[in-house]
Image (cartoon, coloured by chain):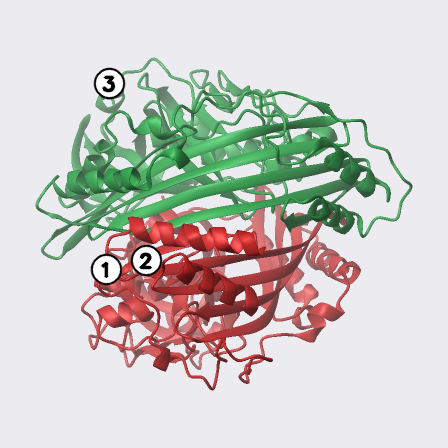
Amino acid sequence: MSGDGGLIEPEVAERALARVLAHGGEFAEVFAERSAGTTMAIDESRVEAVQSGAEQGAGVRVLSGKTTYFAHVDGLDPADIERAADEAAAALREDRATPCPLEAVATTPQQIERRPAEVPAERKAALLRELDERGRGAGSEIAQFMASYAEVRREVAVANSDGLYTGDDRTRVRIGAQAVARREGLVETGAETLGGHRGFELFDGDPGEIAEQAARKALTLLEAGPAPAGSMPVVVGGGFGGVLFHEMTGHGLEADHIQKGASVYVGKLGEQVAQPLLTAYDDGRMPNEWGSDSVDDEGAPTQKTMVIEEGRIASFLYDGLTARRDGVASTGNGRRESFRHLPVPRMTNTYIASGDAEPEAMIAEVEHGFYAVSFGGGQVDPATGDFVFGVSEGYLIEDGKVTRPCRGATLIGNCLQALAAIDAVGNDFEMKTGVCGKAGQKVPVGTGQGHVRIAAMTVGGTEV
Amino acid sequence: MIEQASRAVEAALAAGASDAEAYASEDAGREVRAHGGEVESLTAATKRGIGVRAWIGKRLGYAFGTDLSKAGIAALAGRAVEAARVADEDEFAGPPNPTEVPVRLIRSIATKGAPERIALELTDPSLAATSIADVAELSLAIERAALDADPRVAGVEQAVYADSAERVAIASSTGKGGEYESTSCYGYVQALAEGEDGRETGLGFDLARGPAALDPAAIGREGAERATAMIGARKPESRSCAVVLDPTVASSFVGLIGKALGAGMVQRGRSPFADRVGAEIAGEAFVLHDDGLEPAGLSAAPFDGEGVPRRRTPLIEGGRLRTYLFDTYTARRGEAASTGNAGRAGYRSLPSVSPSNLLVAPGTLAFAELLGEVGEGVLVTDVAGLHSGVNPVSGVFSVGASGLAIRGGEPAEPLREFTIASDLVSMLKAVRATGADARWVPFGGSVSTPSLLVGEMTIAGS
């Protein structure tokens, strides 16, 4: 149980809610958070940038009409919470409203076997040294190698005027590796990450493997030629390839974009936007997955939401505010970077469900095209649907075969056209970790898919 | 603030540090988001925190937190010392040399009384004088201006005003410390224009030290103009041609170049500009300075993130690279002097070399004349995917873009869904002219740049 985590006493929360609503408003909420984390890095084979952070505070919001009033403070003393309540209500001049009595809702946080904070710091430094050794050992042309370690524990508590009183206890760990390969005038980079909503047990397997994978990518790119420029069939790799769906569909299905008319998916609920071979989910409950939480940052239980059912739009992604406006229930997608931010509809773990195509066959059917194994990241304007992805590892496909690697490729297109052009989904499903930015807030998200083929897409390279 | 910072330094020394430095900040901020003629959200908040660098000999550790009570500061300082024990030794580690921190600018911690201030005005009294109701009206005025500018503007995704009044203090075991205040604000709008085959978005923005200097009508109008200009946009044909980058686009690239000129990346062999000091790396028209004392730039400050005075540093002049940017660590390692470029993203972050305000010298050509110089080419008014489309080590990039065709020296039909590709050094060398239209842009750091005419770039479309 993690109803409150000792962050905020129910009496203190109740008093604060009553204090806010004394000046009017239809809904009030106190969000309390305590976070503690450690990060460190290895660079030039030296462990450095060892950092430890500890922050706590509360955010109070009240909804009145179409306006949200929000204030946040550092500190969790009753006086701090009262100050936040007073600041949030400062501009309200309406009739007193009364909050419902709080009722605690127990939640089951994700299972953490070994708390990272209890693992000696030296062990974490040793993990980085292992990554460094493995990365540098991958080839004589690896000129630089960097790796990072990050752990954070976020305890959160939510109390609102509907009477909800709940919380969550979240622990995440993640390592990243980046290799630089050099040959004469050429310089190339490769990166790989491993993370989860888990404890230090995440590294029980072979974490050093990501160092070798990063090095292999950089070494491969030394053989690369220029990327092609123009429209052609594109096969996207599994795992982080899922960022494609995250950008071109996930963001456009977030209910705030929909309600403002700033999404290409407005009015398309139930409509066929892709071929029937495409089914996709947002699932905040996947055990120990990077984007998972027990409850979202408004205290709503996370859930598995089918967003595309056999090519039809099945659901939008809601937080409490947008759900209220549409008269539906929250889908548990109200997330915030910290107590200093307002919750907005955000994805959790978003993925294209496994298909039935063999990845090799998907490639063999392409005469002339591009194979984007993985991306450095992507970006979309949900209102226009225009998106762009930076390819971190890509190859030419010639006569059904993967041939030479390409450097500096970007994929660019429009959501609705690209989604409709997906003509094969592979059976090699895999999840990867990412960090998603929206409205100035970064949150951990999972992306996933097997190989996916898009019949035509613009590859932006330099070879016209 | 300076008292808490000093206490943190003493606590770290007591916990076993041989040297220590504390950076404390306090920020009072407001943000108003408007949508559909109403205030959508109104945020008023303060945040404060402290970050401590502790050295044990040549080992460096860092800790940050929000608990500024005596016990909280002691615990935080202890964590910084613990972190230092885990780090490996680095022969160049250590606080700034006290002689690099003139007493004239910064008072000694031991001195009681008000700190001396240098003549750098970073605050605008209009910020404190403007009520929350008035700044709410400002964000609504931005939205109205966008909607009224053109009947094809169908809506506004959001209109935002935000401001901040910040106080920063640094204390160090070298005996030096200092404190300053600054204010800043910005407004922006994301306008939606309705075309025959879909919606277009356009960004309008401005930034200043206080709301009195913001023009809501201009912000709204810019958003509307940018959105409506894109109606009916099509993919261009793939080709190589001359390109004009407008200031909003140029600033992103200038920011990337500024980062790559940081000595940290250079010394670690991860910058396309490594070993290039004195070499020809840009067209003569491209002149770049870093200026941490230019008050119009929001990164201006009397001293940098480790207490070393900010200054003006010529980076690229006469087409040649003059110097890199240094903080104390990289200066020691590179046998140079700090250029006062230790940057911090707040109390959570260790200082590291980064540009302050980057200024590209404006040229003499008006924008229309710049397009006239091009004749046939592409005007880029927006780029996307910079965080994933640029390789910061090699400088090779390919990013998403939209803009207008240039035909006969005039702006012509709108273009979308294409990429521009090159590498940073080739692009700089291909800069043929700069416009007279320099403006401050918050993308890519704090950058003031005019439009850039780049002789040749690869466009990938259909």
Query: What secondary structure is marked by label 2?
Result: strand
Q: Position of residue A327 (x, y in %)?
A: 74, 25
Say which quadrant the C terminus of chain B sits in.
top left
In the figure, A11 relative to B331: above or below? above
Callout 2 amino acid:
Leu
Mark 1: few/some/many CA within 10 Å (<14, 14-19, 20+): some
Say which quadrant the N terminus of chain B sits in.
bottom right
Is residue B183 at least partly visible in the picture? yes
Chain letter of mark 1 equals B
Q: Which residue is mark 1?
A: B90
Q: Which residue is mark 3?
A: A361
- Which chain is painted in red? B
Residue B334 appears left or right of A422: left
Callout 1 amino acid:
Asp
Q: Position of residue A62 (x, y in %)?
A: 76, 41
Residue B279 appears left or right of A323: left
Residue A336 appears left or right of B386: right
Looking at the image, which is closer to me, A368 or A22? A22
Looking at the image, which is closer to me, B73 or B89? B73
Q: Residue B81 occupies which quadrant of the picture?
A: bottom left
Single out the mark in the foreground, 1 or 3.
1
How many numbered marks appear?
3
In the figure, B115 relative to A140: above or below? below
Residue A269 appears left or right of A28: left
Callout 3 amino acid:
Ala
